[in-house]
Image (tube, rainbow, N blue to C red):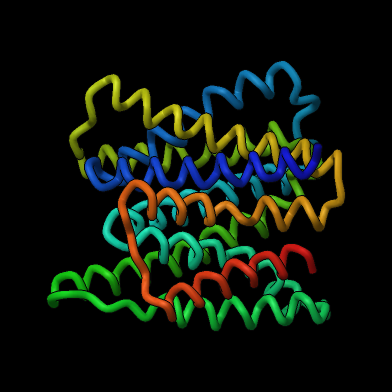
C-alpha cells in the first residue's frame, strides 16, 4: 500500500508541475504562484483546524516553517518560469536536484554521507551537466534555454532550502507546518503581484490553476501517509520520482524530444535523486 501511495504522490506532483508550467506559458508566473499557493492554503487551513492538533510550542519551529515557505515559493517561482520558457523534460529533473542540499548542509556540519549518497550526488552533478547540453535554433532560443537552465538551478536551491527548514517543524505537526509555510508564501507573492499588476485569467481558468495547488497538497498528504505505512527509504525514492511524470507528460502532450546525451543526463539526475533519497 505504501508503494502505491508514494507512486500516486509522485504522479500528483508531476502532474501539478506540468499543469502549472503550462499555465505559466500563458499567464504571469506571480499570478500562477498566487493561485496555486492560495488554493492549497485554503484546503490545508481547513484540514489543520480539524486534524492539525496543537500549534507549535517552540517559536523556532514557527520561524523555520516561515523560512521554508519563503524559500520554497521563490524556488517554485523560478521553476515555473523555467518550465514556461525552457524544455520541461530538462528543467524538471534539474530542479529535483534540490534534494541534495540537505545532504550538503549535513556534510558541512560534520555528517559523513554513505557510499550510496555520495554516488547519488555525483550522478546528479553529471546528470545536470549532460541534461543542460541543449542545442537551439537561433540566438533567442539559445538565450531562453540558458535562462531556463539558470532558473532550474536556482529553483533547486530554493527547494533544497525548503527541505532543510521544513524538517524540524514537520516533526511537530505536518498540517500546521504547511499552514505556516504557505501562509508566509501567499502574502509575499501577493505583494509581488500588487507591485507588477499583471493581468489575471478568466474565472474558470483561475479556479483550474487554484485546483493545481490542491493536487500539490494531495501529493504531500499521500507521501506523508506512505511514510507512516512503509519503509522510509523506499517511499522517499519513489516520491522523489515526480519529475518522471512531468517528463512523460511533456513528451506526450507537448511532443518534446531530447538528444541522446540529454536523455542520459536526465536518467543520471533522476537516479542520483533516488540514491540520495535512499541514502
Q: Is residue 225 left or right of residue 265?
A: right
Where residue 167 sits in the image (x, y, percent)? 73, 52
Q: Is residue 164 left or right of residue 96?
A: right
Q: How many marks?
A: 0
Residue 227 versus residue 48 in the image, above or below: below
Residue 8 versus residue 248 in the image, above or below: above
Residue 54's quadrant in the figure? top right
Task: Identify which residue, 191 or 51, lies in the foreground.
Answer: 51
Where residue 156 sits in the image (x, y, percent)? 51, 64
Q: Is residue 188 left or right of residue 195?
A: right
Residue at x 68% of width, y 18% of height: 49
Task: Identify which residue, 188 or 44, lies in the foreground.
Answer: 44
Where residue 188 sits in the image (x, y, percent)? 42, 43
Q: Which quadrant, please, contains the N terminus? A: top right
Residue at x 25% of width, y 47% of height: 25
Q: Is residue 225 visible?
A: yes
Residue at x 13% of width, y 77% of height: 139
Where residue 165 sits in the image (x, y, percent)? 66, 55
Q: Which quadrant, please, contains the C terminus? A: bottom right
Residue at x 53% of width, y 56% of height: 243
Q: Is residue 110 visible?
A: no
Residue 26 versus residue 207 in the image, above or below: below
Residue 6's quadrant in the figure? top right
Q: Is residue 79 left or right of residue 170?
A: left
Task: Identify which residue, 200 or 149, lies in the foreground.
Answer: 149
Amino acid at each position: 500500500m505504501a508503494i502505491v501511495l508514494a507512486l500516486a504522490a509522485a504522479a500528483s506532483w508531476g502532474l501539478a508541475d506540468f499543469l502549472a508550467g503550462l499555465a505559466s506559458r500563458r499567464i504571469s508566473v506571480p499570478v500562477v504562484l498566487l493561485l496555486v499557493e492560495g488554493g492549497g492554503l485554503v484546503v490545508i487551513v481547513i484540514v489543520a483546524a480539524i486534524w492539525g492538533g496543537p500549534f507549535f510550542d517552540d517559536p523556532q519551529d514557527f520561524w523555520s516553517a516561515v523560512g521554508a515557505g519563503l524559500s520554497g515559493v521563490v524556488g517554485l517561482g523560478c521553476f515555473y518560469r523555467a518550465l514556461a520558457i525552457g524544455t520541461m523534460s530538462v528543467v524538471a529533473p534539474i530542479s529535483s536536484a534540490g534534494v541534495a542540499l540537505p545532504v550538503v548542509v549535513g556534510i558541512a556540519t560534520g555528517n559523513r554521507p554513505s557510499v550510496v549518497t555520495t554516488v547519488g550526488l555525483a550522478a546528479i552533478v553529471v546528470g545536470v551537466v549532460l541534461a543542460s547540453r541543449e542545442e537551439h535554433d537561433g540566438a533567442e532560443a539559445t538565450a531562453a534555454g540558458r535562462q531556463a537552465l539558470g532558473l532550474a538551478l536556482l529553483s533547486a536551491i530554493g527547494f533544497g532550502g525548503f527541505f532543510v527548514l521544513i524538517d524540524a517543524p514537520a516533526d511537530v505537526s505536518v498540517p500546521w507546518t504547511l499552514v505556516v509555510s504557505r501562509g508566509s508564501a501567499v502574502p509575499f507573492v501577493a505583494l509581488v503581484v500588487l507591485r507588477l499588476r499583471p493581468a489575471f485569467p478568466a474565472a474558470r481558468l483561475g479556479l483550474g490553476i487554484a485546483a493545481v495547488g490542491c493536487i500539490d497538497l494531495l501529493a504531500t498528504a499521500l507521501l506523508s501517509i506512505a511514510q507512516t505505512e512503509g519503509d522510509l527509504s523506499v517511499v522517499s525514492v519513489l516520491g522523489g520520482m515526480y519529475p518522471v511524470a512531468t517528463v512523460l507528460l511533456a513528451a506526450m502532450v507537448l511532443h518534446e524530444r531530447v538528444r541522446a546525451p540529454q536523455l542520459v543526463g536526465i536518467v543520471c539526475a533522476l537516479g542520483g535523486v533516488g540514491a540520495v533519497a535512499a541514502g
